């Protein structure tokens, strides 16, 4: 198993999207990229901890490669919006890729450059690409939030 960590706005829909990808074994919502240890949802929502809402994906590289996960990531949100996705505003909703090794970093940077160079989006991509630091699992009521409410996926298509 390998890990991949992505921030793409509110983590509920992003988690549901990644759970539908064949080869993804698990997806957990949480917080990464900030300075406060063990932040709570309420702390992250203040936009003062530095954390992004993220999904940490556990995947089987024999079934799905990181490039495919990047493709899902780029397609499930607008990576040209700084510190917001739709109605959600704040740095906790930023577009971010937190890489776990040098290979992931290289693939993420190359993927971003390729999409910018072909003009895939109308505006430049503002996605942060940074090393994965501590991942703090969100409170249990956030895990599989949409599924618990009878929504198996969000409207995002990939």
Image (tube, rainbow, N blue to C red):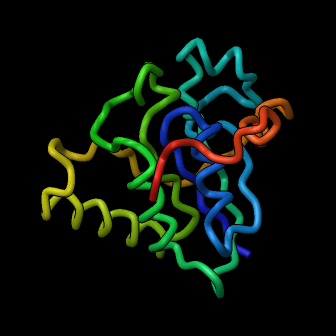
Residue positioned 54% across, 69% down in the render: 101
Residue 153 or residue 122, whichever sits in front: 153
Residue 129, position as x, y percentages in the image = 41, 52
Q: Is residue 137 visible?
A: no
Residue positioned 75% across, 68% down in the render: 25
| Residue lying farthest to the right in this orientation | 140
Residue 89 or residue 31, whichever sits in front: 89
| Residue lying farthest to the front in this orientation | 150
| Residue lying farthest to the bottom in this orientation | 62
Q: Quadrant of residue 36?
A: top right
Q: Is residue 3 left or right of residue 143?
A: left
Q: Is residue 127 above or below residue 49?
A: below
Residue positioned 50% across, 35% down in the render: 9
Residue 75, position as x, y percentages in the image = 40, 54
Q: Is residue 40 above or below residue 148?
A: above
Residue 14, position as x, y percentages in the image = 58, 45
Image quadrant containing the N terminus: bottom right
Q: Is residue 33 left or right of residue 31?
A: left
Q: Disc count in the image? A: 0
Residue 12, position as x, y percentages in the image = 64, 37
Q: Is residue 157 above or below residue 13?
A: below
Q: Quadrant of residue 151?
A: top right
Residue positioned 22% across, 67% down in the render: 114
Q: Is residue 89 visible?
A: yes
Q: Is residue 6 left or right of residue 118?
A: right
Image quadrant containing the C terminus: bottom left
């Amino acid at each position: 198993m390998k890990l991949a960590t992505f921030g793409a706005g509110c983590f509920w829909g992003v988690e549901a999207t990644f759970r539908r990808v064949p080869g993804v074994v698990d997806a957990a919502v949480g917080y990464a990229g900030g300075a406060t240890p063990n932040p709570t949802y309420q702390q992250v929502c203040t936009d003062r901890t530095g954390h992004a809402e993220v999904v940490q994906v556990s995947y089987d590289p024999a079934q799905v490669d990181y490039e495919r996960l990047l493709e899902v990531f780029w397609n499930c949100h607008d990576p040209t919006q700084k510190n917001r996705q739709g109605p959600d505003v704040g740095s906790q909703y930023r577009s971010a890729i937190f890489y776990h090794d040098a290979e992931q970093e290289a693939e993420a940077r190359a993927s971003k450059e390729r999409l910018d160079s072909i003009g895939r989006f109308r505006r430049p991509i503002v996605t942060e690409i940074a090393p994965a630091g501590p991942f703090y699992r969100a409170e249990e009521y956030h895990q599989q939030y949409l599924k618990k409410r009878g929504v198996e996926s969000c409207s995002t298509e990939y």
